[in-house]
């Protein structure tokens, strides 16, 4: 049994659960019978039924909220079926294998970063998980760049064979009719890979054009994440012409020195600005993501980030921005600095269990909410429509004022987080209610 737990309390994410579908294809190829459970779209009773009939239950887990869901599910499995084998896989295990293996409710772990990704995970059994989620897929795996904050870096990049990629998307589309696909590759547009000890170079533009045409010919749109230096005018033209409607760009910082010397990003502020200029007028919706309060980052560095965001907003008003609070994820080079308390940060107290990792506040700060209310207003207005806008308006006005003053140390985070959570829950209940059909006799 393969389980994808809810990724957050509100479970806003609806991407296809590839982290259990690809391993499922792998285990089926080994001759095993596989069942699935997605906690976002299936009732708990389905989980209970599968536990009773399973010899092993494996849960895919990211660091954060999924850890506490994984803990709950595996403890429940042990209570219901004491002889069941309990296992954990996914990013959290890859970062902290020894700690996860010490959990009393865990019998085994899967540390592979790639398991079944060369197989086709669509069939009659998995159909509903594609149908009921927002279509996601991979056109490559791995990322060779050494960014010090990222646990996915310095891994071998492998491109999918595009004839196979196109055939698989065509089969899925013919069965579920998706209108958009999110390519969740860590590095979609890289230009070389290793084959039998030799470096094989690709034409980045030709490859992205083929990917775009495959999806466009299905009558669908698509989105992906890319590196700023790759977004030349030629690349933007290829994306816009081939139905790419959204981009996610990891900008991280507005400080040239910090980007190059600490984060090892491989590019500087000039590349970020040039990408914004190239994308202006393209019709592509862009989210620039930044990180704040990182090891060695000064208040001056943060102000440089805010200045860069103001510059982006001036030249490209349609762009959206998020500033995450730095989270010391295990397996990254900045994590060691955080644990040691180097570069001016207080020592990061490492959580001792999966439950502690889940309850430790990560990635959000006053600046996260201040920036979000300023530069993701489209999302806020979708969440608070009509008279509901009055609920968030005072916090929006406060955020605008604080951003202008560079006053970023204090904000009613708990109040706003609770308000947004309640609003999302209300919308989810409304959606569920509208989906209920009355059958007339």
Image (spheres, grey):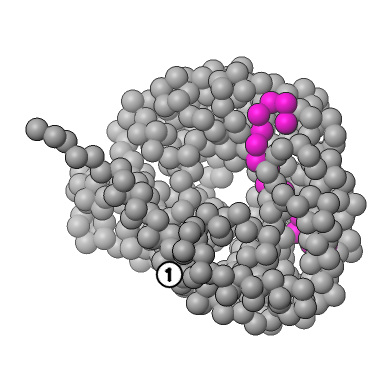
Relative height, residue 22 to residue 393 (above, below): above
Left or right, 191 with reference to 369: right
Relative height, residue 307 to residue 117 (above, below): below
Q: Residue 149, located in which quarter of the rendered image?
A: bottom right
The percent position of residue 283, horizontal first and vertical second, equals 71, 38
- Residue 21 appears in the rendering: yes
**Which quarter of the rendering shows the C terminus?**
top left
The percent position of residue 114, horizontal first and vertical second, equals 55, 40
The percent position of residue 161, horizontal first and vertical second, equals 63, 22
Left or right, 202 with reference to 371: right
Magenta-colored span: 239-254
Residue occupying the point 64% across, 73% down: 397
Dot 1: few (<14), some (14–19), or many (≥20) neighbours within 10 Å?
A: some
Residue occupying the point 51% across, 64% down: 389
Relative height, residue 284 to residue 307 (above, below): above
Left or right, 13 with reference to 142: left
Q: Nearer the viewer, residue 82 or 434?
A: 434
What residue is pinned by disc 1?
A: 355
Of all residues, the one furthest to the front in this rendering is: 387
Q: Nearer the viewer, residue 55 or 326?
A: 326
Residue occupying the point 33% across, 55% down: 429
Q: Secondary structure at mark 1?
A: helix
- Residue 138 appears in the rendering: no
For the image shown, how many numbered marks are present on the structure? 1
């Amino acid at each position: 049994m393969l389980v994808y737990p809810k990724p957050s309390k509100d479970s806003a994410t609806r991407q296809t659960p590839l982290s259990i579908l690809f391993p499922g294809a792998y285990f089926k190829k080994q001759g095993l019978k596989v069942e699935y459970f997605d906690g976002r779209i299936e009732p708990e009773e389905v989980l209970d039924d599968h536990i009773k009939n399973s010899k092993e239950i494996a849960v895919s887990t990211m660091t954060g909220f999924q850890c506490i869901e994984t803990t709950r599910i595996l403890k429940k499995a042990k209570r219901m079926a004491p002889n069941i084998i309990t296992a954990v896989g996914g990013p959290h295990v890859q970062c902290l294998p020894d700690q996860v293996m010490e959990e009393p409710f865990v019998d085994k772990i899967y540390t592979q970063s790639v398991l079944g990704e060369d197989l086709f995970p669509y069939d009659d059994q998995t159909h509903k998980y594609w149908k009921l989620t927002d279509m996601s897929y991979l056109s490559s795996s791995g990322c060779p760049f050494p960014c010090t904050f990222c646990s996915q870096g310095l891994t071998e990049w492998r491109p999918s064979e595009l004839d196979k990629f196109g055939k698989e998307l065509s089969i899925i589309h013919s069965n579920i009719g998706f209108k958009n696909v999110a390519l969740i590759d860590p590095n979609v547009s890289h230009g070389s890979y290793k084959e039998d000890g030799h470096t094989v170079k690709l034409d980045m533009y030709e490859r992205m054009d083929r990917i775009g045409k495959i999806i466009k010919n299905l009558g669908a749109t698509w989105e992906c994440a890319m590196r700023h230096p790759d977004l030349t005018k030629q690349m933007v033209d290829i994306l816009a012409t081939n139905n790419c409607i959204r981009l996610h760009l990891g900008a991280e910082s507005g400080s040239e020195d910090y980007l190059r010397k600490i984060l090892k990003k491989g590019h500087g502020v000039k590349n970020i600005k040039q990408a914004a200029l190239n994308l202006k007028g393209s019709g592509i919706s862009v989210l620039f993501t930044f990180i704040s309060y990182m090891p060695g980052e000064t208040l001056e560095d943060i102000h440089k980030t805010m200045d860069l965001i103001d510059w982006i907003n001036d030249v490209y008003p349609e762009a959206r921005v998020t500033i995450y609070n730095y989270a010391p994820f295990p397996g990254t080079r900045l994590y060691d600095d955080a644990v040691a308390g180097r570069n001016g940060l207080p020592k990061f107290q490492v959580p001792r269990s999966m439950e502690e990792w889940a309850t430790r506040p990560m990635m959000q700060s006053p600046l996260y909410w201040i920036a979000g209310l300023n530069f993701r207003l489209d999302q806020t207005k979708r969440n608070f429509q009509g008279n509901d806008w009055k609920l968030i308006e005072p916090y929006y006005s406060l955020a605008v004022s604080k951003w202008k003053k560079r006053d970023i140390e204090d904000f009613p985070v708990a109040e706003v987080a609770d308000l947004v959570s309640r609003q999302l829950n209300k919308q989810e209940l409304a959606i569920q209610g509208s989906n209920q059909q009355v059958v007339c006799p």
